[in-house]
Image (tube, coloured by chain):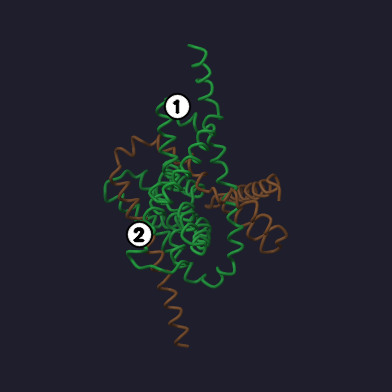
Amino acid sequence: MTHQSAIWVYLSASPLFGLALTLICYLLAVKIYHKGHGNPLLNPVALSVLMIVMVLSLFDISYQSYFSGAQFIHFLLGPATVALAIPLYFQLGKLKKVWIPLSFALVLGISFSGFSAYYIAQFLGASEQTMLSLIPKSVTAPVAMGISEKNGGLPTLTAVFVVITGVIGAVVGGWVFKVFRIEDDSVKGVAMGVTAHGLGTARSFQISPQMGAFAGLAMALSASVSALILPLVLSLIQKT
Amino acid sequence: MPFLTMMTILLVYQLVGELIVLSLDLPVPGPVVGMLLLLLSLMIKNPFAVQLEVSTGFLLSHLSLLFIPAGVGVMVHLVRLQQEWLAISIALIVSTVLGLLVTAWSMMAICKLLNWKKAQS
């Protein structure tokens, strides 16, 4: 083995590599996204994942050795979830005004997005584990992975579904609201937050600050409500 | 607020959340309990709410970055995704559109119902 390739083997297995690769690809993806005038099809997360997967398979690096570095970013999902209490706190005034319609929308939206995916997948012949992993796909990643594990799904598969769902929501959201003539920013925000979690919220903030605030609010509430109702609904279904 | 103070506060709340979940065997993930505890503490007394808002702005504005390592996990599940790609993609797309519509419509319907009741009384 030459000296250079020995260095490369060492570096590609060290945490530094996965960490740096993730940040570089993210910054690059954000740049491309802005160059494309915020076209939702150029979603930064989808672009970054694509770039990273390409680099990893090109150099034959396993997900495990990539994740030994990327875990430091992944870990921040926990404190970021705790930090959602802060925007929530500043929106409490608005929340008090709309809490009745909001709670109905939350419970219906959460159950519908999760279990419509479950039944569609069942109808199209997906495996049991795929179906179970699909249920929490609209909830923000750390919470969704927790729910998936408790339900008997695969947490890492759920994480992939969560990211894909977020990208789909960010891409189709604006179009769905236009076609079905949904115009109220607070309603649109809640729908994005409940269905497409953090990625829907990021997209909503680009459309209007009010829509973003409601999306963030709905996402944070949905994270706590989903953890309670999704396992409950599932156990009711499995009993019958 | 310094970065270190903010991270310490967030991590302590997360840790307490995890401890509560583990000891009471709750069906909720630890960070969510941590979030609710932080919200509760801010509602009781908010000496650092504004400072926390400024310092956590960085973390929350790059929320999408935090999803990337999990998204790359798609590599591990390539075989399953290849076998079930049609069912998975239709389930994800249709349920996302349905989820958006059901959430928006139910919220608008209840708003209308409440206004209608107000007009009646």
Q: Return the x and y of residue A80 as percentages of the image width and height.
A: 58, 49
Chain of the residue where label 1 is placed in the rendered structure: A
Q: Which residue is mark 1?
A: A61
Q: Which residue is mark 2?
A: A175
Q: Taking B2 as reference, is B71 left or right? A: left
Q: Earlier in the sequence, mark 1 or mark 2?
A: 1
Q: Is residue A144 above or below residue A207?
A: above
State the green chain. Answer: A
- Most distant residue in the top direction: A1
Q: Amino acid at mark 2?
A: Trp
Q: Amino acid at mark 1?
A: Ile
* Mark 2 element type: helix
Q: Return the x and y of residue A74 as percentages of the image width and height.
A: 53, 41
Q: Return the x and y of residue A8 as percentages of the image width and height.
A: 50, 20
- State the hue of chain B: brown
CA gap between label 1 and label 2 equals 38 Å
